[in-house]
Image: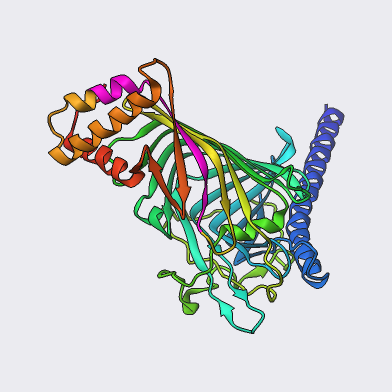
Amino acid sequence: MRKSLGLLACAGAGVLALDSLLWWGGVQFLEHRLASASASASAGGRGGAAQSVGCPVVFQHKERGGWPFRAQVSLEGVLITCGVSAGQGGLSYAVRHAVLYLAPWHPLTVQGTLDGGQALAVQAEQESAGAEKPGYLLLKTDGAPVQISLPLRAALAGTLLFHTDFLHLVPQRGVAEAHPVTARGVSGKLVWNGHADPQASALALSFAAQRALVAPWADSVGDVQGAVSIPGPMARLAALWPSDDTASNSPPTSDVGNLGGGESADGAMGSTPKDQSESSDHGVTDPPPPSVPPSSPSGAAPGYAEILVQHVGGRWRGLGISWSGRLVMAPGGAPLGETWLTLSNWRPFLARLQQDKTLNPAQTALLSKLTDQLEQRTGGTEGPLSVPLQVRDGAAQLGGVPLLSVLATLHGVSLSGAGAP
């Protein structure tokens, strides 16, 4: 009996030792991956203007945990800066709290959780004359924790999967600033390819949401889906963010870098195999603005960037809406291109709007004009309706009517309390 108990104790000790060894190896793997991102960024910066710039990762605090069932690294105050290429501007991404872990039930991927406020900003850029273009915020988000899945090994090409129960997107620039988006049941996939040529996608995003509400509309859009891609090479992405000459919300220099003053990814840290007991920070959702370090002096313009909108659509009050097309952006310019708006089940929808007595005379006249134009275009045939939307200098028109006027009419209908189907 004693012998059996002794053997059982030895076996248990061996299992614990093996589990601790695997845990330690997993933690070291995660730390090495974080450190390799910063190392590749530093090497890229020294390699010349033609080489790619990596994405250094800095943070305020790091702690190991997850033992015995998973290897986990928790990061606080995370800041990632990604340059498109040496000599060109790039992006900064900040998140309050991030957890990366390896688990036996996900053997081929790195799983993670992003919690607290997040922010996306354009980095400051040094011009050839020595002047500096300031950085500025593009987007802030908050909501439920975002679950992510990353490739096991870092590479210039890969896929990131994400999903969350609730997401609030607050644009910080342009017309979109007045239209924050609240979405529920969000999931999607981001694909990147650092080797992409003009015939391949450097970035591709597909997403879906059960419902989305765009302010100031009163009604939400259901069954939201979209797929957008940007052909390579990566250097062309710099054309997506304009110069900040007209920016009114650039982060003050005194507020910049609040997340970036901590350890780098290869800094020293503790090594206790215990779960971190962390206080929840749900009460504060907006992180400090991402740091916007200056890039190298600019060389030649990277050229225009293409945005291929395969489809972005949803369903509102029975009306199916889908937008697709091709947009082009030159550095410092506004998007232009040819796109199409496809409407399904549009006849019953327009009939309901015309029968609604809550529209004012101006809105009724605009709706009648639009309906007449659509009837002439389709010749009275049934089926989905495809309407060309020309985008010029960032402005779009629908059937010769400014799109913003159409949206204002629909917004008025929404506020009027017209009955939904």
Q: Report the number of discs.
A: 0
Colouring scheme, one of rainbow, by chain, secondary structure, one colour: rainbow
Q: Identify the image quadrant of residue 326.
A: top right
Horizontal placement of 303 versus 282: left or right? right
Work out whether residue 396 or residue 419 is closer to the camera in this orientation and state it. Answer: 396
Q: Identify the image quadrant of residue 416.
A: top left
The answer to whether residue 275 of the structure is visible from this angle is no
Q: Report the residue at 53% width, 74% height from top.
A: 134
Q: Report the residue at 81% width, 47% height from top.
A: 21
The image shows residue 249 at horizontal and vertical percentages of: 42, 69
The answer to whether residue 134 of the structure is visible from this angle is yes
The image shows residue 393 at horizontal and vertical percentages of: 46, 55
Work out whether residue 349 or residue 180 is closer to the camera in this orientation and state it. Answer: 349
Q: Which residue lies furthest to the top in this view?
A: 382
Q: Residue furthest bottom?
A: 130
The image shows residue 3 at horizontal and vertical percentages of: 87, 30
Q: Report the residue at 40% width, 70% height from top.
A: 248
Look at the image and say whether residue 370 sits in the magenta stretch. Answer: no
Q: Report the residue at 29% width, 33% height from top.
A: 370
Q: Identify the image quadrant of residue 93.
A: bottom right
Rendered view: 222 above or below 389: above
Look at the image and say whether residue 339 sits in the magenta stretch. Answer: yes
Work out whether residue 28 or residue 357 is closer to the camera in this orientation and state it. Answer: 357
The image shows residue 115 at horizontal and vertical percentages of: 51, 51
Question: Which residues lie in the magenta part?
Answer: 334-351
Rendered view: 175 above or below 15: below
